[in-house]
Image (cartoon, coloured by chain):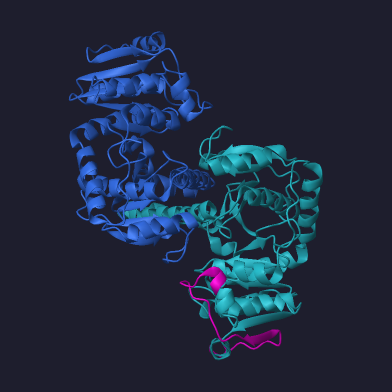
Chain colours: A blue, B cyan
Amino acid sequence: MKIALDAMGGDFAPKNTIEGAVLALREFPKITKLFLVGERPRVEAELSRLGFEDPRVEIVHASQVVEMSDGAVESVRRKKDSSVSRAVDLVKTGQAEALVSAGHTGAAVAATTIKLRTLPGIERPGIASVIPTEGNVFVLIDAGANVDARPIHLLQYAIMGAVYSRHVLGYANPSIGLMSIGDEDVKGSDFTKEVFKLLKASSLNFRGNIEGHDLFENPVEVVLCDGFVGNVVLKTSEAIAHAIFQWLKHELQKSHVRMAGAMLAKGAFKAIKKKTNYEEYGGSPLLGVNGICIIAHGASTPLAVKNAIRVAAESIAQQINPHIVREVRRYHESTPAAQPAPAHT
Amino acid sequence: MKIALDAMGGDFAPKNTIEGAVLALREFPKITKLFLVGERPRVEAELSRLGFEDPRVEIVHASQVVEMSDGAVESVRRKKDSSVSRAVDLVKTGQAEALVSAGHTGAAVAATTIKLRTLPGIERPGIASVIPTEGNVFVLIDAGANVDARPIHLLQYAIMGAVYSRHVLGYANPSIGLMSIGDEDVKGSDFTKEVFKLLKASSLNFRGNIEGHDLFENPVEVVLCDGFVGNVVLKTSEAIAHAIFQWLKHELQKSHVRMAGAMLAKGAFKAIKKKTNYEEYGGSPLLGVNGICIIAHGASTPLAVKNAIRVAAESIAQQINPHIVREVRRYHESTPAAQPAPAHT
């Protein structure tokens, strides 16, 4: 498997990206080529600092880096030699089968969409994030690729989320919930009410509106929302989980008795922390582009980068894009009212 | 103080509302009148079940109840004798100084807006929810009153949130953060970019875009978002906190050693649970209406209802509406570009 890593993308790049790359190469022999895309001197310096040499590594020089303050589409137009754009080019030319970026999400989405195009019938790609519940997982789509979505985009996300849930997560008949305010059909914003109608008219396994409590008490397999809401929900959830553990830690340190109790119970804390730790998930696929792109957390640690590369390798093995194309076609054939979406827009 | 309680509003009404009312009357002698608005026979049955008699109680009969499946504005037009509408009428006629409802949020917002009108310069009311961090609190506005907001509404929420933070929570110069994706100025949806411009041009203490992690690590005093995002964030956060405690409980029950540890550390768990328990906060003021309306959680327990009544009593004492009116006027005077908002729309 041949994977391109945006070595300069992320809050702690290239240090964490290169360390993650080294971990991945050590752990995954099925990777036959890992392109490290970025400023050659800095990438080389990190590799030599780590004393790492591997014939599977190929450095691809890119002289520019997309900064967090850059606009998404502008970054593709103006920084033609950015690490993320060059990583996408490697996928476009077939030298790599997938790319991984922990950098500016908007830039990765724009570069991928512009250079690889979307799949037939898909207008906008969406990030599919896998979220753990106590006994299961669900996929939240869109986690932040498309912040000004139209209702039809969410219908396409529903199709892609269901394909992902079925083919990757193994749910035979994934149910779909629309993140809204109030569980009742009549509730929601003007936007979600439009999405509700589209889903209701489709043959998808649509369960209706869902709210926060449904995520864990009455879970669906696919949670739908626009990229703005999805990103805010995801980041706030992460922050809440982190804050609760911090408070608990401080409370536990307030007395010797509590500290002793915490020692005895530490296995329980570790189990939960592992479950809620994004580093274990690594990265989320950007579904709907004609290629494989894994979006990793901006603050990715080396462990998170390693796992994002693992997700890329798994995605290469899974090849769900043909399933997405087939399901979108099936939607258009089975829903007479549906306007065929223009391909590759 | 004279307060009207929508006795039929909430998932567990009238049982929990009446039990909460009884708790409030026992605890707060400054309440001189509590109107219990709802179906008289059911309210009387609850009171006699509890064996409670108090001359401060006055039952106001309302023959209808707004159901969760009713539309918000339609509920006001079609169910003229609903408990929430009758409770608003008591405030309108001056018989009550505030109302409390744990029922259909949209219906309470619509009834209050239509009957009491908004304050001069405010186009839409917003729900101000107080959220705890480890050492402080912040106010999130709008938590769900206005799900199809326009940018100017968020500017008005910023003014109201700052007034609330200053006069009720005691922050001298509250800073305001706009919930967005990415901390950088250029990031966000088309909607938040418009709001950003309005805030930047104002004399408000605007800190810029914020994300989930900022809420706890780098907190502002006022968190701004539209009612859809605010409601989803709030409910998801509640669900995450609840889920984490559930998982932890199950993990702690997996061995005798862990259970012994949990016993020793139980003070720490209790402290956190108390901090994250919405029942302690009770209810959130609907800011921007010409009157006082407290919105309680739909699943309110008797304790939550009692605390919502406490918040109503505090709001009567605080009287922040004149401050809001003054600050909105000051905004229009100090911001030449600002179009004076139409009063009472």
Q: Is residue B71 magenta?
A: yes
* Nearer the observer, B188 or A34: B188
Q: Does any portion of residue B60 appear in the rendered image?
A: yes
Residue A289 rendering spot, x and y as whole percentages: 31, 35
| Residue B305 among magenta residues | no
Q: Main secondary structure of the magenta part?
A: loop
- Magenta part of the protein: which range? B48-74
Q: Residue at x 66, y 43 (%)?
A: B176
User: Which quadrant would the C terminus of chain B be assigned to in this image?
Assistant: bottom right
Residue drawn 44% across the image and 45% down it: A149
Question: For residue A89, what is the image quadrant?
Answer: top left
A47 on left or right of B272: left
Q: Is residue B282 left or right of residue A233?
A: right
Q: Is residue A345 depicted above or below B242 in this figure? A: above
x 68%, y 78%: residue: B89
Image quarter of residue A39 = top left
In depth, the one of B50 and A115 nearer the eye is A115
